[in-house]
Amino acid sequence: MTPQERAERSAAAMQAEDHATKWLGARLEAVGPGTATFSMIVETHHLNGQGICHGGYIFTLADSAFAFACNSYNRRVVAQHNSISYLSPGQKGERLTATAREAFLSGRSGLYDITITGGDGRKVALFRGASRQVSGQHFEEEEQ
């Protein structure tokens, strides 16, 4: 099995049970070893009292990209801690895209940088996630 196939099978297994990302309205655009891209359209129910996308939804979009990137090796991985910096607001009707890239992976620990961009390409937020591998796999793999 190639690393790309492993990432795709891991993503399919996760998507089957990921009710939070589905509820958000986010869509998996791409996945690969240590990478993932999700997008969502900012709808009325995503808006806060300022009329812009609520930061919690932006965080959730980034967290989903982070989760799929760090779980792309068919090892169960959870978040250890995350941080986000909001740079510009998401607007109603705009497509937000969260692109996760692995910055570091050693043993059971990893760091991932996620950039959230708006429809015009501007940076909406920067998110960093630290991951920790736990026991288990997303699907059974045959020994090579």
Image (cartoon, rainbow, N blue to C red):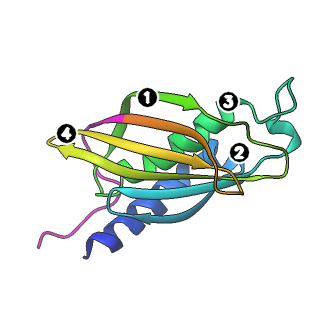
Mostly what secondary structure, the magenta segment?
loop
Judge depth for marks 2 and 3 and give the one in front: 3
Three-letter amino acid code at the position of disc 2: Trp
Between disc 4 and disc 2, the foreground one is: 4
Label 1 crowd bin: few (<14), some (14–19), many (20+), radius 10 Å: some
Which of pointers 4 and 1 lies earlier in the amino acid sequence? 1
For label 4, the residue is: 108
Identify residue type, mark 3.
Gly
Residue furthest to the top: 49
**Where's residue 16, x and y in %?**
54, 56
Mark 2 and mark 1 lie on one chain; the one further toward the N terminus is 2
Tag 3 secondary structure: helix
x and y, in percent, of residue 9 in the image:
40, 67
Q: Distance of mark 2 from mark 1, alpha carbons? A: 21 Å
Residue holding disc 3: 55
Residue located beneath label 2 in the image: 23
Q: Which residues are magenta?
A: 130-144
Left or right relative to 92: residue 69: left
- Which three-letter amino acid code belongs to the residue tagged 4? Arg
Pointer 1 residue: 82
Mark 2 vs 1: CB contact within 8 A? no
